Structure formats: structure tokens, C-alpha cells
């Protein structure tokens, strides 16, 4: 039954989650990976996406990433404030970070990372890796400082300040 503050015909969190799961199931049936994602903003469905990596060979084409790209283009903004993500499975660290960076504050998922691991779908291990110091992670990511007099961050900060100050003439 719908909560009192919701119209009976307004899709609920569970309805959107079921939609994401249906997308995942259909994608698996047609040869794709079993993931779907739906993005909703102010009650409007902005994107319904599936994992397309088997078609595009782009390893970043997770359902959530595909949905984020679609919505950011539609909004003409890298900020997806007010958007809610419904993902069939727990967003992997890449998607989680992309959602965070885009200003998304709310997300729901139907299947846990542990549940995925039971089917040989691995991403749960990466969460644990990210908690380790860089030197202990299996991927070698090394900080090698470079002395720069014309630092790109300083260039950026100056441009920001100039833009804030407005035109000088
Ligand atoms: Zn992902």
C-alpha cells in the first residue's frame, strides 16, 4: 500500500527499483550484463539504462554511468542535484564515485555486492582495496611529485577568481 503522503498512482521507490531489475533481467536475456539503472528527478524518470559494455567494449559503460551521461546531457550540467538513482545491484566503486561527484544525494539498490559475488560478478573486492594504503593495493598508483612553476591548479584558481570578479574593462 502506498504511504499516506503519496498518491496511489505515483511510482514508489520499489516501483523504480523493480524497473531497474527488469532492465537488468532483459539485458541479461539479450546477452548483456545483468545490470539496470533508473534516474528520477522530481518524480520524472530521466533515464532508464542498462550495462552496455558487451556492445561498446567501454569498461565504464555500467548502467549507472550510462544513465548519468544521459541525464547530464539532457540537463546540460555536470551536476545531477535532486536526482535519485535506482540501481539493480549495489553501485560499484566507479559508479558510486561518479554519483557522488555529480551531486547525487540518494540512491537505492536491490541486490547487494555480496549477492553478486555468489554469481561470479565481482566488484565487492574493490571496495576493500580502496580502504588500503596505496602501497598495499594490487594496482600500482604512485605519487611522484613534479616541480612546476606554472602549476595548473594555480592557473585554474586565477581563472576562477577572474571569472568571479567579472570583466575588467
Ligand atoms: Zn559500476
Image: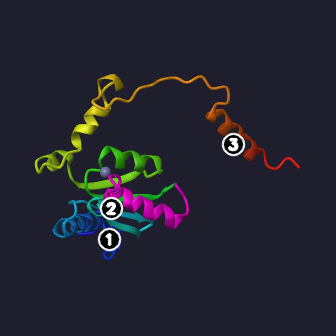
Verify whether residue 69 appears in magenta: yes
Measure how far apart labels 1 and 2 are at the Cα level.
32 Å
Q: Residues within 10 Å of mark 3 (few under 14, many from 20)?
A: few
Q: Secondary structure at mark 3?
A: helix
| Residue at figure coordinates x 45%, y 66% from the top left | 42
Magenta-drawn segment: 57-78
| Residue at figure coordinates x 30%, y 62% from the top left | 52
Measure how far apart labels 3 and 2 are at the Cα level.
37 Å
Specify the quadrant of the image occupied by residue 88. bottom left
Q: Which residue is mark 3?
A: 160
- Front: mark 1 or 2: 2
| Residue at figure coordinates x 47%, y 23% from the top left | 144
Camera-nearest residue between 68 and 13 = 68
Q: Residue 12 in the image: state x and y as whole percent.
A: 30, 67
Number of the label disc, if any, that sits on residue 140? none
Q: Secondary structure at mark 2?
A: helix
Verify whether residue 117 appears in magenta: no
Seen as rendered, the residue at the extreme left is: 118
Q: Residue 163 in the image: state x and y as whole percent.
A: 73, 47
Q: Which residue is mark 2?
A: 56
Q: Which residue is mark 1?
A: 11
Q: Is residue 40 left or right of residue 21?
A: right
Amino acid at each position: 500500500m502506498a504511504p499516506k503522503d503519496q498518491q496511489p498512482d505515483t511510482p514508489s521507490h520499489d516501483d523504480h527499483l523493480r524497473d531497474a531489475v527488469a532492465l537488468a533481467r532483459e539485458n541479461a536475456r539479450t546477452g548483456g550484463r545483468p545490470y539496470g539503472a533508473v534516474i528520477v528527478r522530481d518524480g520524472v524518470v530521466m533515464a532508464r539504462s542498462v550495462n552496455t559494455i558487451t556492445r561498446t567494449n567501454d569498461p565504464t559503460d555500467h548502467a549507472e554511468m550510462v544513465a548519468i551521461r544521459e541525464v547530464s546531457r539532457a540537463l546540460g550540467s555536470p551536476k545531477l542535484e535532486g536526482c535519485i538513482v535506482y540501481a539493480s545491484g549495489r553501485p560499484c566503486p566507479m559508479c558510486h564515485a561518479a554519483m557522488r561527484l555529480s551531486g547525487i544525494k540518494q540512491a537505492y539498490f536491490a541486490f547487494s555486492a555480496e549477492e553478486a559475488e555468489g554469481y561470479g560478478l565481482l566488484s565487492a573486492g574493490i571496495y576493500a582495496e580502496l580502504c588500503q594504503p596505496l602501497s598495499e593495493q594490487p594496482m600500482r598508483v604512485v605519487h611522484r611529485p613534479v616541480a612546476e612553476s606554472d602549476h595548473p591548479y594555480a592557473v585554474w584558481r586565477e581563472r576562477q577568481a577572474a571569472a568571479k570578479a567579472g570583466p575588467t574593462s
